[in-house]
Amino acid sequence: MLELWQTEWCPASRRIRERLTELGVDYVIRQVPVDKEERVTLRGQTGSDAIPTLVLEDETVVTG
């Protein structure tokens, strides 16, 4: 299953959520802190602190 690391206020995150929903793709939303310094879990899981970040089923990380 896909994982979308995102914030509610991010326009790019919203566009990705909408597109995945349109395509009928199942995904899990992971909320990310607004403050970059607090994105420890995101960095640990993906190697990046960019939002949005999408982790594909094969563990490929797509940012931005």
Image (cartoon, rainbow, N blue to C red):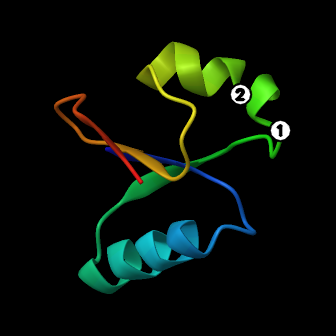
* Amino acid residing under circle 2: Arg
Q: Vertical placement of 33 versus 20: above or below? A: above
Q: Quadrant of residue 13?
A: bottom right
Q: Quadrant of residue 20?
A: bottom left
Which quadrant is the C terminus positioned in? Answer: bottom left
Could you tell me if the residues under marks 1 and 2 are in contact, i.e. CB atoms within 8 Å? yes
Which quadrant is the N terminus positioned in? Answer: top left
* Amino acid residing under circle 1: Asp
Q: Vertical placement of 31 versus 59: above or below? A: below
- Residue 57's label in the rendered image is none
- Tag count: 2
Q: Secondary structure at mark 1?
A: loop
* Residue 7, position as x, y percentages in the image: 69, 57
Nearer the observer, 44 or 35 = 35
Q: Quadrant of residue 44?
A: top right
* Residue 55, position as x, y percentages in the image: 34, 39
Outermost residue toward the left in this view: 58
Nearer the observer, 7 or 3 = 7
Relative horizontal placement of residue 29, taking residue 38 as reference (left or right): left
Q: Which residue is mark 2?
A: 39
- Residue 35's label in the rendered image is 1
Label 1, label 2: how many angstroms apart (C-alpha)? 7 Å
Q: Residue at x 60, y 76 (%)?
A: 11
